[in-house]
Image (cartoon, rainbow, N blue to C red):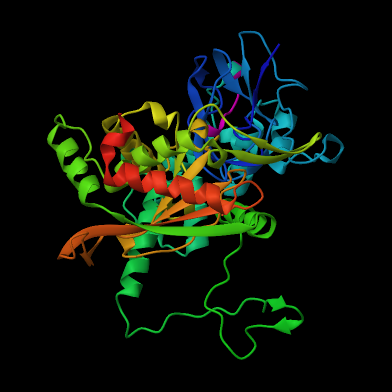
Amino acid sequence: MATEVIMPKFGFTQETAEIVRWLKHEGDAVEQGEPIAEVTTDKVNMEVEAPASGILAGIRYREGEVVPVTQVIAYVLQPGETLPGGPTSPTPSVAPSQVVPTPAEQSLEAADVPVTPVAARLAEAEGVDLSRIKGTGPGGRITRKDVEEYLATRAEGEGRVRAVPAARRLARELGVDLGQVEGSGPRGRIQSEDVRRVYEAQARTVTAAPEREPEVTKPVAPTLGGETFGVQTPIAEVIPLAGMRKVIAQRMQQSAQQAPHIHLEITVDATAAEALRARANQRLKEGQPKVSLTAVIARACAWALTQHPRLNAWFTATPQGEQIIIPAQVNLGIAVAVEEGLIVPVVRDAARKNLLQLASEISDLVERARANRLKPEDVVEGTFTISNLGMFGIERFTAIINPPQVAILAVGSLRREVVADEQGQVRVRPAFTVTLCADHRVVDGAVGARFLADLREALEQPEVMVV
């Protein structure tokens, strides 16, 4: 019996995922656990692994298609096995009763030549006569790889630019001339990444040339509350609210509307924290990442949360009613700005890790977040979040709680300030401001104030964390 390859569900709220690319193609041999496709959710890119060893067959979705979770996206066959419904099993994009064979499939049915559904659709889109192609799949079946190789050979013979179909489609969408793109694939074949690189370079060139007026498109004018926008004012761009940006919008709106936020602010003398960071960096081994101020704050924050567990909590609605759940460990979320928006990877059990361990793990998570290489387990079950905008010169700000968490700490920039000490002497000290934003349904002002007092003590007198 054919083994189904399903679109995994990487999170509780996930409903769909987009197939970014197939790492294995129709007719390829695969090993159990081997990555066969790369997919993207609203948070991270992930690899789908082969559930069994065998031959990959019956690929049902093309790159760029959005697939509901738990849907079958392909099969793994053993010798002698066939696809459910026969060798030309249709894709699930339409109901079985609505499936109409493509012209390529119809011509091949008459010639009794086996072909995969993806190969047939690709051949039809490119105007390929499949009778000219020799199949390399099981039983001589024509696969997508066979069609792509034929297209590449044809392109060479006709002097055309060699590019994968996905790159051609992307070039059409972005308005990129493939003749100006240098391919990085096999034998110089243009990949989607090559098209994006040229498009981004062209965009930078346009930005750097102020004497050229940008072309302004005028899409359908949006409306809000009966008022129409863009009638007299030209619209430069309309950006659909989708993917990560849509999830951020939904979650932040939910938090702002449902959680009554309270904001408490203190200023921390950073003299001891900076000294601790300097000593920690002196102890680093070669290749270890530098200890940042964020790591020092994370260490102090994790310690303070063990003293005030009500801030290290989730507020949830269950069939039994609304509940406050206190986890048994501190999972610190570190907010990271990425190109698509904001993502919060999680340092698990942070209170049990020393400063160097936290610094190393935070550095790794931030690096993978910006490279879009986070795993699903990296972004779930956070119990408290730290958002640091100090590197942008922001001295203080308030943040929106990341539900179902009940609090978030907003960290401002490190600055030099003039103060009078206890003896009345004027001195200059390093300092920064932190703002606790908490859900008043769970946290009262006094609880938040005591947490901030302990946090400040841990940062100004780090020895209290080991006494």
**Left or right of 46: which side holds 269?**
left
Residue 128 versus residue 252 in the image, above or below = above
Say which of 40 and 214 sits in front: 40
**Left or right of 47: which side holds 157?**
left
The reply to whether residue 357 is in sight is: yes
What residue is rendered at 55% in x and 78% in y? 217
Q: Residue furthest right?
A: 97
| Snapshot quadrant of residue 72 | top right
| Residue 353 location (% of width, % of height) | 35, 28
Say which of 83 and 159 sits in front: 83
Residue 458 versus residue 288 in the image, above or below = below
| Snapshot quadrant of residue 60 | top right
What residue is rendered at 39% in x and 26% in y? 352
Q: Residue furthest top?
A: 79
The reply to whether residue 370 is in sight is: no
In reply to whether residue 140 is colored magenta, the answer given is: yes
| Residue 238 location (% of width, % of height) | 58, 71
Residue 45 versus residue 232 in the image, above or below = above
Location of the C terminus by quadrant is top left
Query: What is the number of callouts on the image?
Result: 0
Say which of 270 and 251 sits in front: 270
| Residue 125 location (% of width, % of height) | 61, 48
What residue is rendered at 16% in x and 32% in y? 284
In reply to whether residue 355 is colored magenta, the answer given is: no
| Residue 76 location (% of width, % of height) | 61, 18
Location of the N terminus by quadrant is top right
Q: Which stretch appears magenta?
A: 139-144
